Amino acid sequence: MNSTVKKNRPVNLDISTIKLPITAYVSILHRISGIFLFAGVAFLLWMLDISLRSAEGFEQVKAIGASPLCQFILWAVLAGLAYHLVAGIRHLIMDLGVGETLKGGQLGAKLVVVIATVLIILAGVWVW
């Protein structure tokens, strides 16, 4: 192969112009929600640790939990959990051979978005 031959392949380095299918967005968000949950568990364990130390610690966690910032963090962790759970169930179903076609994958991805959105809204209603 001649190394002096110029390759005429198109190169698109602008990520904002790339159009990804819904299945890609669902997959990327599933990974991001997993990373977010890993970080969120640290916050939840910190709250658990304080609440189990003493009665005063429990009251302190109750006071912290009443703040809007803490409620937002709790909702965000629950939202990540809801999305990750629904997307994970989709992957398990696909591992069984259901929804592996292009149309099946797209339908599964749309269902993940709809079901996760409903669960995230319900989590917000529950937290607030």
Image (spheres, rainbow, N blue to C red):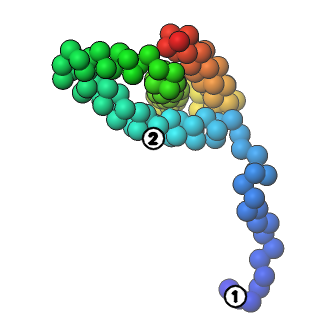
Residue 58: where, in percent of width, then height? 27, 17
Amino acid on which the number 2 mark rests in the picture: Ile
Q: At 32% across and 26% down in the image, what residue appears?
A: 47
Q: In the figure, is residue 86 to the left or right of 12?
A: left
> Can you tell which mark lies on residue 50?
none
Q: Which residue is mark 1?
A: 3
Q: Residues within 10 Å of mark 2 (few under 14, many from 20)?
A: few
Q: Quadrant of residue 109?
A: top right
Query: Measured along the vertical axis of the image, is residue 7 above or below residue 33?
Result: below
Residue 107: where, in percent of width, then height? 67, 25
The one nearer the camera, 78 or 86, is: 78
The image quadrant where one finds the N terminus is bottom right
Task: Of the two numbered discs 2 and 1 on the same chain, state the one appearing first in sequence.
Answer: 1
Q: At 67% across and 30% down in the image, what residue appears?
A: 106
Q: Residues within 10 Å of mark 1 (few under 14, many from 20)?
A: few
Q: Marks 2 and 1, Cα distance to the nearest angstrom?
A: 42 Å
Residue at disc 1, secondary structure: loop
Q: Which residue is mark 2?
A: 35
Query: Measured along the vertical axis of the image, is residue 14 above or below residue 108?
Result: below
Q: In the figure, is residue 34 to the left or right of 98?
A: left
Residue at disc 2, secondary structure: helix
The one nearer the camera, 38 or 3, is: 38
Q: At 56% across and 10% down in the image, what residue appears?
A: 125
Q: Quadrant of residue 66?
A: top left
> Is residue 97 in sight in this rendering?
no
